[in-house]
Image (tube, helix red, strand yellow):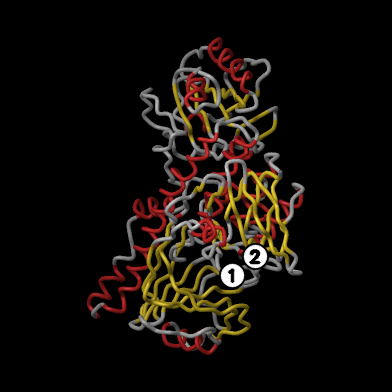
Amino acid sequence: MNEVLVVGGRTTGLMMACELMRRGVPTRCIDKSSGIDPHVRANLLHSRTLEIFQGLGLDEQLTVGSVPEIGFVFYRDGNPVGESPHAPIDSPFPFGMSQSQAHTEYTLESHLNRLGGNVERSVALTSLDQDEDGVTVVLKHGDKREETARYQWVIACDGAHSAVRHLVGEPFPGDSDEIPYILGDVLIDGDEDLEPNKGHVFFHRKGELFAFTRLPGNRHFLVASLAKGTNPGDEPCLEDLQAIVNERARPSMRLYDPMWLGYFHINYRLATRYRRNRIFLAGDAAHVHSLLAGQGMNTGIQDAHNLAWKLALVVNRQAPDALLDSYETERRIVANNVIDMTRTITDTMEKYTDLSQQERETFVSHLFTPEIARLDAARHLQEIDLDYSASPLTLSVDDDFEDGPAPGTRAPDAANLFVGGQSTSLFKLPADDQYRLFLFCGTSGAPPIAEIQQAADASLHHASLLKAYIVRDRTLDIAFKRHTVIVDQERKMHQNYAAERPCIYLIRPDGYVALRSKTMNCHEDYLARIKMIDG
């Protein structure tokens, strides 16, 4: 029996297949389309997604030709009224990057090919039936041939109209926005005033026009609202979008060479469950929301990043099946928050047309916020502040840390580290399939060398589950046998992790803090608690 069938070969499905194959899980990926879609529907890679890709060694390929989005310019009736710069966050990628979805998919598919996998195109799922031991599926190929196959697990990454979700009868409750939108991927003559690394938002009494950060090839992704209750028909023409640009921006911006035009209705929906025994939902198959804030593609990629390492541990019999329940516990909360955030942004923008002249002036003035508020907003927008503290995979130990990343939060990067004499950063350490145990020697006083060595030695009994790193500053010249030592040259890692005193951090394979403690062997309690070892 094959192990996993991934249904859907776009960003979420590609990420899922790559992460499973990288961990040695035989995975088949199918997609009903004939190839990568060149049409732009998602054009922003957020900082957290780029951090994940950096750990996979894909960040340089994905950012080729990309443009950092550093803020927004706002307009009223075609006239600029001010800018709102994004606050740079503490990350190797302080800003999100504008990149075409097609390039992201091409990069991921090439990575999948290098791992020995591929996307089988023009293959659609038409039936599935699961039992205690697996899932039987019927697949229809482009040549009309039908195939029956069986898998241990099936993962739905097949979008908002997911065939898997429909076949298992999973409810997809929610509602639709009454305002339709027109979208376009176009070139613009007379766009000199549209700075390429900023989003441009045009407010008008008849609706909003968004010109998002310029895409590779100097193209623009335009989104405009239409009147409430409008029935726009099937396909727009370039003249329809040009008329809106003339009205809400300026007639000197002449649109040409449309790669894609379309109408779009915003839906806010969230699957009741992410898991039906051996079947999982991810990405748009599990949640849909407004495209404003660019959360959809990034949330789907991070769904895959969350589920893949857990499923690999279960498939490889290194963890109990119950570990998989944490996927829904963690990621459904994230999707709920994304839906709430994007709905708030969209509803706020859409209310502009109903305001009086004075109210519109007040509305625009409130778009400009203090720097500290912009930093909080940027961390949230870039998905840096995700919190899994309520997860069963998070262990909180009351050890009186005054600072540093709390259990359940993202483990931050640190630069100017030396491993084996080579300069590196934390995020650039080789992507492991295991948990990482960081044993900090501290920077104040004499470290308990014997305890640190003992804890590191004990970790070798669980070498398939975790890898230990001993972190010391450059003043402590002690060799730790059989273990990788990180020399924290400028004490930046100690500082980021509030490790003035000796302590440990156990970091999950997806880069979130599982526990921290000033007790060196506390990771044993964690592994026993989540049933990865016998306590």
136 with respect to 347 (left or right) = right
Q: Is residue 196 above or below residue 437?
A: below
Q: How many marks on residues? A: 2
Percent position (x, y) of residue 139? 68, 60
Percent position (x, y) of residue 308? 59, 43
Instruction: Name the secondary structure under disc 1.
Output: loop
Residue 144 placement: quadrant:
bottom right
Amino acid type at circle 1 is Val
Q: Is residue 281 above or below residue 177?
A: above
Residue at 42%, 67% in the rendered image: 267
Q: Is residue 279 above or below residue 412?
A: below
Q: Quadrant of the N terminus?
A: top right
401 with respect to 169 (left or right) = left
Sequence order check, earlier mark of 2 and 1? 1
Q: Viewer-proximal residue, 145 or 59? A: 145
Q: Residues within 10 Å of mark 2 (few under 14, many from 20)?
A: some
Q: Viewer-proximal residue, 522 or 385? A: 522
Q: Are marks 2 and 1 in contact (CB under 8 Å)?
A: yes
Percent position (x, y) of residue 523? 51, 22
Residue at 48%, 68% in the rendered image: 199
Q: Residues within 10 Å of mark 1 (few under 14, many from 20)?
A: many
Label 2 sits on residue: 102
Residue at the limit of the structure toward the top, as seen here: 450
Instruction: Name the secondary structure under disc 2.
Output: helix
> What separation in Å lies between label 2 and label 1 (alpha carbons)?
7 Å
Label 1 sits on residue: 40
